[in-house]
Image: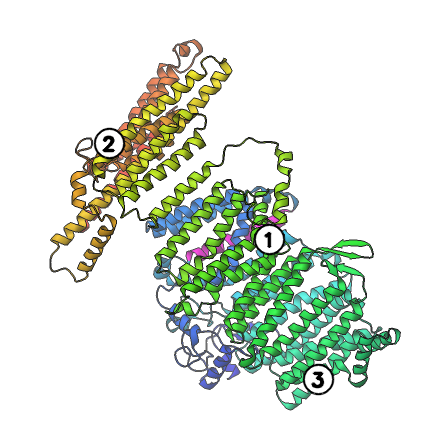
Amino acid sequence: MDPSGSASRQGRLLISPSLSTPTFSTRSASPSPAASPAPHHHHHERRNSTSSPKPLVPFPSSSSSAGGTYRPRSSTGGGAGPRGAGASASSAPGAAFAHNARLAAALVPAAAFLLDLGGLPVFAVLAIGLAAAYLLDALQLRQGAFFTVWAALIAADVAFFFSASLSSAAAASLPLTTLALLLCAQTSFLIGVWASLQFRWIQLENPTIVVALERLLFACVPIAAPALFTWALVSAVGMANASYYFAAFCMVFYWLFSIPRPSSFNNRKQDAPMQDSDGILGPLESCVHSLYLLFVPVLFHAASHHATLFTSWGSVCELLLLFFIPFLFQLYASTRGALWWVSRDARTMDQIRIANGLVALVVVVLCLEVRVVFHSFGRYIHAPPPLNYLLVTITMLGGALGLAAHAAGKVGDAASSAAFTVLAVLVSGAGAVVIGFPVVMLINICVKPHLMFFLLLILLQFLPLPMISGYYVARFFTKKSLSSYFTFVAIGSLMVLWFVVHNYWDLNIWIAGMPLKSFTKYVVAAVIMAMAVPGLALLPTKVRFLLELGLIGHTLLLCYIENRLFNYASMYYFGFEEDIIYPSYMVMITTFLGLALVRRLYVDQRVGPKAAWILTCLYSSKLSVLFMTSRSVIWVSSVLLLAVTPPLLLYRDKSKGPARMKVWQAYFHASVVAFSAWLCRETIFEALQWWNGRPPSDGLLLGSYILLTGVACIPIVVLHFPHVQSAKRFLVLVVATGLLFVIMQPPIKLSWVYRSELITAAHLSDDDTSIYGFVASKPTWPSWLLIVTVVLTLAAVTSIIPVKYVVELRALYAVAVGVTLGIYISVQYFFQALVLYPLLVATVVAAAVFVVFTHLPSESSTRVLPWVFSFLVALFPVTYLLEGQLRAKSFADEDEAEKFTNMLAIEGARMSLLGLYAAIFMIVGLEIKFELALLLRDKAADRGVAHGPSSRSSAFPPKARLLQQRRAHAAPTFTIKRLEAEAAWMPAIGNVSTVLCFIICLVLNMTLTGGSNRAIFFLAPILLLLNQDSDIFAGFGDRQRYFPVTISISGYLLLTALYRIWEETWPGNGGWALDIGGPGWLFAVKNVALLVLTLPNHIVFNRFMWDYVRQTDAKLLLTLPLNLPSIIMTDILTIRVLGLLGAIYSLAQYMISRRIRIAGMKYI
């Protein structure tokens, strides 16, 4: 590739290897034709390979290049891959935004932090705005939804600026608070830009805008996200290491956004003349990102530690580390194309990478020596100064240079291999001298002639073990010899054993609940197994089980060690005790590294699916120690995950084809899940105790066990038996039963079940009694009745009980549900009125029989159900009057205080009765409305089948047959025509039940709230259940279904306004207005006049709701201003509501009329 031609495009960075400062060219030049296509294909293959990093990586592009421009091929050959295909697809018109996952990783946590920082006001504003935007988008008002999203974000920003947390911080540091507010505003703006890219109409109508927005996001997110993430982390863990957190986040987001990515919207063939880069970002943005990564962490550290910046060599080393570690990361990222703006020439980039990387690596190693090695591990360095500095430098710098050379692919020929071997031997020998391996070993042997030390002395007399291990590890890297690696593992194991014995074996310390000598045995075993795993991974496939056994054994040891360290947080030494907290982030790091390793080995087919399944479950179970305090939670979680995950992991490949889990395997896995959940009972108990703050009841514990078992069996049914209806029904029944036990917590004694010591000790505690005292409670046994009712209903709905086909079973089911639910309601809510129990049970039984046989009619049900409904209506006044009369006579002779208390109890019971009957009448109205709608739909389908033209497509008869099959299964013993002939009473009964429900709700509203204006807007929709019949509502049809709602709202508010005027003017017996100067005739006349001004719009709109006759626009515009005086001048809130509602009615009528007119014009 020609270096000059590679940098001659418009907007490319012109740089030579001798220059250190980039200069941007503004000249346009044609690409050099000297470059051949062969290097392009070669570099593209190296880009898609999984080997070590290569010197140069081209841009991902959606089209093939020509001439001297450096582009990978995306149209032909294996070099395209999925990346090229995705880029080509993304250039199509209206393509979706392809980088949502990348932006979600940055902006979703940032938005969550801002919501937590802003508090409830920001959350409320944002929730209302986004709900409105969702509603507008559902109504296909695209521009309205777009502007609503931005309005919600702006309103949330305003609420955020006035939050209490930032106002209190502003008093401490005004400049810092201003910067924080600007950062929050920028983040909100970026969230709005990201949301704007989700609107497809913007992509279609403004293709250049979406390209600019995409570029804006990739340019600004790596600047704003690291600061906000560091802010959040510092708020949680403190400011001590904030600069290192900031540098880490800068590197993460640099990798996510500054590596060249293909645009989601650009069409390369059309936009090539205007593009200054092959990716989303241009050279200017990429240069700014590089400068931000290198210098801003250093400046942040200098600003936050300015007082101690140059007080010691450690402080200077911190500054150098914060610069050169991101610099090394940037050089590694250049192998993925991060420094494309410096040069496109592979040789030039390789030279830049080697020269700068060598300097950066030397500085980083030297700073780590000062800041980490000598600062924290000085006790293990046995060489005297100044020899110790020299040996540590040789060890660390030599090892780092050797690894970097091998990773860069510079170790290949004989000379480089020999140099690498010599360097490895030198590094291992120097490291051994630093830790005192040979010398200290001999001294200890002379002093303590022990058998094990004597054997080690015999080995050391013949071979210098550290240097031999260095030679063999170098031979493994250069010759790929497995025997050399296992020799290194054997020698390295002896060295690790010596180090542990020499430094920790004789210490009388207890750590992790055991002696240090025992704990080091587990650590040494884990280290040796970890050293052996890379060699086992290179063994042939036939002995793959050795790698699987090694990985499983190492994971078990790691789980055991971390469980002991996390749960036994005390160390005992020389009679003293000290708390040592194993950090939570170490558990998370080892877990995610282990999961990534398992994923990589499974993808490379080095471990089988069963081993990957076991390892995934073991590593995932380690996270449970972060949430549970039980010392056995990690093993219990492992068992539960091993029981739950086989349908997801073991049968994953089989589930794609016809061969799925067999029936006996499903039963076996379900049994294992149930047994594993039972083993987790202590963990479930501790989780519930932590959530509730007190020991859970036995009913809650049993319900949680049943619920956990049912949820754990969901993958078995959903993934492997989706066609088996009985399995789905039984699973629904199990999950519902568990939920009912959790919610109701019925009284149950688990003494007949094995109860652990932990659960027994928690139940024997008297903390609740000592804190809260003895609290009288209602009887809890009726909860069993509600559980039985719900379970029976679910069994009937899911056809486990065949009530659809057996009339006797249907009747028995209705009576049983009515009896259990009636007894539950009586005991739970009317426990002081024993005389009402038979009437309440009869009421609920009658309602259950009516609803069940209306939904599933039989031969004689249409003749009996009207009498059942009449009996139900007759029970209403009898029960209501009986409640007051009988109970009032029982305390007629009591004193006034007790009589007043009992009268309040009677009033509360009557309100409960009214609520019960309102719910029953609403259920009856809903059922009848549903059945009538189903009847009309079936009649329309029959009419379409019988009178449909013969010229219809051939797809219609199968649909008709499907409808008839459905109706045959729904009502096998009763035809639709007969139902229409014998069930003409259904609309009338539905209307009666609807009107009764509405009236009872109005009574409850007047009694409980004093006639709230807001309540009518929730109660009026009940009238949507009205039906057209031949008696009461003869002229009422489907067109007039909204008329009762609007007329009831207007009438209720009108009557309420008149009542408020009367009450304010003539309260009580009257006369107070003249006596003390209260509202008089002027008040009444003014408000009545304002009330009259609101009536025209209500009358016109309600008439329109009845006949839909279009009014002239002039009439609507003339009546609309009549509502303004009522809104502004009235003294009664109800009249103001009427005025606002009248204005809304006028605008709604205008919009509906306009829409009907437009639809008619389109039809014409």
| Mark 3 → mark 1, Cα distance in angstroms | 46 Å
Q: Is residue 226 left or right of residue 952?
A: right
| Residue at the right extreme, as displayed | 447
Q: Which residue is mark 3?
A: 471
Task: State the residue in front, 600 or 557.
Answer: 557
Q: Give the CA separation, mark 1 to mark 2.
A: 59 Å
Q: Given contact means CB atoms under 8 Å apart, are the residues at marks 3 and 1 in contact? A: no
From the viewer's perspective, is residue 464 above or below residue 20?
Answer: below
Q: Could you tell which of marks 2 and 3 lies nearer the N-terminus?
A: 3
What residue sits right under mark 1 in the picture?
627
How far from the left and from the top, in percent, is residue 52? Answer: 57, 78
Amino acid at the residue labelled 1 = Phe
Q: Which mark is residue 568?
A: none
Q: Whole-percent x and y of residue 523?
A: 70, 67
* Residue closer to the observer: 793 or 550: 793
> x, y percentage for residue 1164?
15, 50
Three-letter amino acid code of the residue under disc 3: Tyr
Q: Which residue is mark 2?
A: 867
User: What's the amino acid at mark 2?
Assistant: Trp
Q: Quadrant of residue 1135?
A: top left
